[in-house]
Image (cartoon, grey):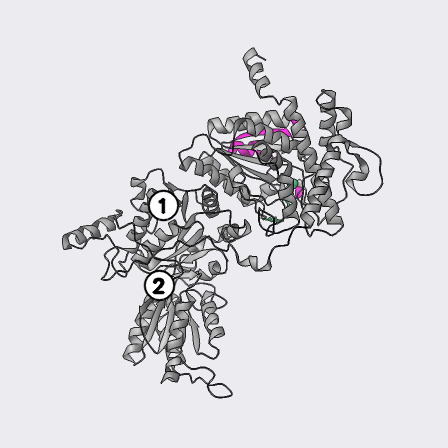
C-alpha cells in the first residue's frame, strides 16, 4: 500500500474506543431482541420481528456511513432487521434512547413516540436523523429511497445520498425494478442494500429469486456493485466506506450485496423462535477477535456454552458487557410495562394534517381560461412558491397528453421531468421526494385507468401521517385524468373515484371548473399531506365556470389569451386565489330535489335540471368538489329543504362512492326517497359509440331518477316517516 493510502486508511479505521462502542451497541441489540423473544414466548406482546445475527453488519455499516454522511445529506429506509444499524446510527448522531423507543413501540404504549401504538415494532421514523418511515409492505423502501435521492437533486444538492435496505427475497418485487430504473435513468445517489440471509420466511432462493447474479443485474442498469460478508466486521466496514464514498462523490447508484447473514430466531414471532445453534454467530466471533486484538478483555464478551432449553440465555455466557445491558434492558422493560396504553379515542387523531385555513375566492362572469390552462398556471406558481417538481409520462417535451403541463418545461427546465413509463416508479419516487421538508411533489399519471399498479402507494400515502402519529408529512399532489370522453373504451374512459375514496387519509378532489381546478391546486400546495386530484377529461380544453382572478378582460387581451393558451402557453393568474378543501358548491339552487354530482356529472346534472325545470320540477345541483372528506353539511342542509336526493356521478354506483353519499343521507334522514345513478354496472365502456352511450351516465338517467324520487310518497307504518321541514313549517 502506498504511504498516502495507508495514511487515509489509518485515518478512517475505527479507533479502539469506537470498536468498544460498536460492540456495546451490537450487544445491546442482541440483548433487546432476545428479551423480546422471551416476551413473545410468554405472550406478553402480540407480535415481534427482529434481527439477531445482523448486529455485526449493522454497527459496522453505521460506523462506516457516519464517516462519509450525516443526517443533513443522508436519508435511509431501514429493513425490520436493521435494529443494530439504526441504533448505532442514532447514537453516532446524538440520540441514545433507541432501546427505550423500541420497547415502547414493542409494547404498543401511549408513550411510543414513533407511532403512538399504531405500528409494529421496528417501524421507525426519525426524520431529524435521516431515518425515513418504515412501512410493512416489503419493497417500498426502494421507491421511497429512490425518490428521496431524487429530492436531493431537485433541491440542488450534489452531496446527498439515500439508501434502501431490503432482504434478499424482496428483490423479486417490482419495487426493485422500479428503483433500478429510477437510479439508472435519473442517475440517483442511491444505495440499494440487499441483506441476504438466503431465505424469505420459508421461501428459498431457488424458489423465489429470479435475479441469479446481482453484479450482472447492476451492470445491466449501469450501476456499480459492491459485496461483502455480513459476518465480517472489517469487510463490512471497509466495503461500506468505499461504497458510500463512491455514491456520494459520483452521485450514482449501487447495489450493495451483504452475503451470508444468519437468522437466529426464525422469521418473526409467528415462527418457531428457538435460537438456532447450528449457525455460527458473528457476534461471538467478532468478540473473540476484539479480545485477540486487545480491544476487549476476555471477561467482557459474549460466548456460547452448553445449556438446556430453547432460550438464548441458557446457551450463552453473557460476559461483562452483556450483563450490564441485561440490567439496562430489564429496567427499560419494567418501566415500559407500567406506562399507559393508548387512549382508544386517539384513533381519530392525525388522519389528516391540518387543512390550510383559506377563504374561498368568489368570482362571477364566465372565464376564458381553459381547465388545462388553469392547471398550468397553478403548477407554475407551485413550482416557484412551494419548491414544486412535476414528473410523469410525457409531461415535459409534450406538455402532457392532456396539455395540462404544456409550457412549463420551458419555464422550469429542471422542475418538469419526463419520467420512465412506470406508474409505481412515478408515484413511489414522488412519495419519497415529498419527505424532504419544503418540497412539493407533483406526480402526474397519464390516465386514471393506469394508476392501479401504484395502488399500494396510495394506500400507504393514506396511512403514513396517521401511523407516524402525525410526524411524517408527504407533500404530494397526484393528478390524473378521469371520466369518459368519447371513444376511450375500457382503459381510457373509466371513472375510478370509488377506488380512492375508500382510502382514509387521502384528500380526494375533483374540480369541475377552471377556478376550482386552480384554487384547489393552490390550496393543496399549502397542505402538508397527500392529495389526489381527478381531472375530468372533457374539461381540459374548455373554459368552464366563473372568471379566474387575474385573467384579462379587454377583448383584444382575451383573444390573444385564447390563442396563447391553445398554443400551450402558461397564463399568469392571481396567485392568491384559493378554494377550500371539503367545501361543496351549489351550482344551481332549487327546492324540489337535490342532485349531488362531481366531475363531468355536474354538467349532466345541470342539463337534467334544465329539463326538469321545463317539466315543473325545481332541482338544486350541488358540486361536491372535494369528494373526501365530503362536505356532508351542505348536502344535509339541501336535502332537509328539498326532501329528495339523487346522487349522480360517472363512477359506478354499485358498492362505490356514489352509493356511499346516498347512504350517509339515508342514514340521517330515514325514509327519504333517494337514488344513486352513474355508469352502468358492467366491467367497462365498450369501444362502440352505441355501447358507450348505453353505459355512461346520461341526462335521462338523472331526470328519471329525479322524477321517481319526487313522485315517491313518503310514508311509514305510523303515518309519515319523514317530511321535509318546509311541509311541517307550511
Ligand atoms: C409486499 C409484501 N408482501 C408480503 C409480505 C409478508 N412478508 C413479510 S417479510 C417477508 C419475507 C421477506 O424476505 P426477505 O426480503 O428475504 O427479508 P428477510 O425477512 O429474510 O430479512 C414476507 C413475504 C410483506 N410484508 N410485504
Ligand atoms: Mg431473506
Q: Note whether 643 is above or below 492 in the view shown.
A: below
Mark 1 or mark 2, which is nearer the start of the sequence? 1
Q: From the viewer's perspective, is 193 left or right of 586?
A: right
Relative depth, front residue between 410 and 364: 364
Q: Is residue 347 magenta?
A: no
Image position, residue 437 (x, y; %)? 44, 42
Q: Is residue 225 magenta?
A: yes
Relative depth, front residue between 326 and 440: 326
Relative depth, front residue between 544 and 650: 544
Which residue is denoted by mark 1 in the rendering?
Answer: 395
Which residue is denoted by mark 2 in the rendering?
Answer: 600
Image position, residue 290 (x, y; %)? 71, 24
Image position, residue 6 (x, y; %)? 58, 14
Using the numbered discs, state the Cα–Cα distance from disc 2 to disc 1 in whole angstroms. 23 Å
Q: Is residue 552 visible?
A: yes
The verdict on label 1 being within 8 Å of ligand 1 is no
Instruction: Write down which quadrant ligand 2 falls in.
Output: top right
Q: Residue at x 78, y 27 (%)?
A: 299
Report helix, strand or loop for mark 2: loop
Residue lying furthest top: 3
- Residues drawn in magenta: 206-234
* Disc 2 to disc 1: CB gap under 8 Å: no
Q: Note whether 233 is above or below 272 in the view shown.
A: above
Total marks in image? 2
Quadrant where the image shows the C terminus: bottom left
Image position, residue 337 (x, y; %)? 69, 49
Amino acid at each position: 500500500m502506498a504511504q498516502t493510502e495507508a495514511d487515509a486508511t489509518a485515518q478512517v479505521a475505527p479507533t479502539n474506543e469506537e470498536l468498544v462502542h460498536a460492540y456495546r451497541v451490537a450487544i445491546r441489540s442482541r440483548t433487546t431482541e432476545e428479551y423480546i423473544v422471551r416476551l413473545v414466548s410468554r405472550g406478553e406482546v402480540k407480535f415481534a420481528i427482529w434481527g439477531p445475527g445482523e448486529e455485526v453488519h449493522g454497527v459496522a455499516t453505521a460506523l462506516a456511513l457516519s464517516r462519509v454522511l450525516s443526517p443533513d445529506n443522508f436519508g435511509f429506509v431501514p429493513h425490520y432487521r436493521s435494529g443494530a444499524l439504526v441504533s448505532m446510527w442514532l447514537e453516532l448522531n446524538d440520540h441514545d434512547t433507541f432501546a427505550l423507543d423500541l420497547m415502547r413501540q414493542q409494547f404498543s404504549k401511549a408513550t411510543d413516540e414513533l407511532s403512538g401504538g399504531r405500528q409494529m415494532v421496528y417501524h421507525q421514523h426519525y426524520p431529524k436523523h435521516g431515518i425515513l418511515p418504515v412501512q410493512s409492505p416489503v419493497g417500498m423502501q426502494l421507491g421511497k429511497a429512490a425518490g428521496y435521492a431524487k429530492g436531493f437533486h431537485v433541491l440542488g444538492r450534489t452531496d446527498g445520498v439515500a439508501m434502501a435496505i431490503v432482504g434478499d427475497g424482496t428483490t423479486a418485487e417490482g419495487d426493485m425494478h422500479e428503483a433500478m430504473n429510477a437510479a439508472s435513468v435519473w442517475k440517483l445517489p442511491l444505495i440499494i442494500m440487499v441483506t441476504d440471509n438466503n431465505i424469505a420466511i420459508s421461501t428459498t432462493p431457488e424458489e423465489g429469486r429470479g435475479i441469479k447474479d446481482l453484479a450482472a443485474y447492476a451492470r445491466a442498469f449501469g450501476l456499480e456493485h459492491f459485496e461483502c460478508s455480513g459476518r465480517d466486521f472489517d469487510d463490512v466496514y471497509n466495503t461500506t466506506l468505499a461504497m458510500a464514498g463512491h455514491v456520494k462523490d459520483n452521485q450514482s447508484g449501487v447495489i450493495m450485496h451483504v452475503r451470508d447473514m444468519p437468522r437466529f430466531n426464525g422469521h418473526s414471532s409467528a415462527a418457531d423462535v428457538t435460537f438456532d445453534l447450528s449457525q455460527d454467530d458473528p457476534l461471538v466471533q467478532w468478540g473473540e477477535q476484539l479480545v485477540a486484538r486487545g480491544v476487549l478483555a476476555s471477561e467482557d464478551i459474549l460466548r456460547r456454552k452448553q445449556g438446556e432449553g430453547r432460550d438464548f440465555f441458557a446457551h450463552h455466557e453473557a460476559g461483562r458487557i452483556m450483563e450490564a445491558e441485561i440490567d439496562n434492558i430489564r429496567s427499560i422493560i419494567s418501566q415500559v410495562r407500567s406506562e399507559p396504553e393508548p387512549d382508544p379515542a386517539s384513533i381519530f387523531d392525525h388522519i389528516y394534517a391540518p387543512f390550510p385555513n383559506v377563504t374561498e375566492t368568489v368570482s362571477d362572469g364566465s372565464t376564458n381560461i381553459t381547465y388545462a390552462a388553469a392547471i398550468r398556471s397553478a403548477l407554475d406558481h407551485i413550482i416557484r412558491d412551494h419548491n414544486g417538481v412535476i414528473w410523469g409520462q410525457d409531461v415535459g417535451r409534450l406538455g402532457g397528453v392532456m396539455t395540462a403541463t404544456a409550457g412549463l418545461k420551458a419555464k422550469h427546465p429542471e422542475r418538469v421531468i419526463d419520467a420512465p413509463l412506470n406508474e409505481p416508479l412515478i408515484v413511489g419516487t414522488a412519495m419519497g421526494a415529498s419527505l424532504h421538508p419544503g418540497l412539493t411533489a407533483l406526480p402526474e399519471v397519464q390516465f386514471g385507468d393506469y394508476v392501479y399498479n401504484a395502488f399500494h402507494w396510495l394506500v400507504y400515502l393514506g396511512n403514513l401521517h396517521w401511523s407516524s402519529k402525525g410526524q411524517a408529512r408527504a407533500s404530494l399532489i397526484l393528478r390524473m385524468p378521469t371520466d369518459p370522453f368519447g371513444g376511450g373504451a375500457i382503459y381510457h374512459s373509466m371513472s375510478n373515484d370509488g377506488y380512492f375514496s375508500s382510502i382514509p387519509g387521502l384528500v380526494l378532489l375533483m374540480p369541475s371548473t377552471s377556478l376550482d381546478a386552480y384554487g384547489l391546486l393552490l390550496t393543496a400546495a399549502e397542505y402538508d399531506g397527500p392529495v389526489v386530484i381527478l381531472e375530468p377529461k372533457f374539461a381540459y380544453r374548455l373554459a368552464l365556470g366563473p372568471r379566474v382572478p387575474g385573467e384579462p378582460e379587454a377583448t383584444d387581451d382575451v383573444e390573444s389569451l385564447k390563442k396563447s393558451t391553445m398554443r400551450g402557453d402558461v397564463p399568469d393568474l392571481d396567485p392568491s386565489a384559493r378554494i377550500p378543501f371539503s367545501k361543496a358548491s351549489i351550482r344551481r339552487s332549487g327546492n324540489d330535489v337535490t342532485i349531488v354530482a362531481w366531475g363531468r356529472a355536474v354538467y349532466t346534472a345541470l342539463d337534467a335540471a334544465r329539463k326538469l325545470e321545463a317539466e315543473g320540477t325545481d332541482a338544486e345541483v350541488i358540486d361536491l368538489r372535494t369528494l373526501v372528506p365530503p362536505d356532508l353539511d351542505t348536502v344535509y342542509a339541501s336535502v332537509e329543504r328539498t326532501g329528495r336526493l339523487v346522487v349522480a356521478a360517472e363512477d359506478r354506483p354499485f358498492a362505490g362512492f356514489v352509493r356511499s353519499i346516498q347512504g350517509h343521507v339515508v342514514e340521517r334522514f330515514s325514509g327519504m326517497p333517494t337514488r344513486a345513478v352513474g355508469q352502468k354496472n358492467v366491467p367497462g365502456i365498450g369501444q362502440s359509440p352505441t355501447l358507450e352511450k348505453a353505459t355512461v351516465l346520461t341526462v335521462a338517467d338523472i331526470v328519471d331518477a329525479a322524477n321517481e324520487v319526487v313522485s315517491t310518497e313518503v310514508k311509514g307504518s305510523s303515518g309519515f316517516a319523514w317530511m321535509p321541514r318546509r311541509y311541517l313549517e307550511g
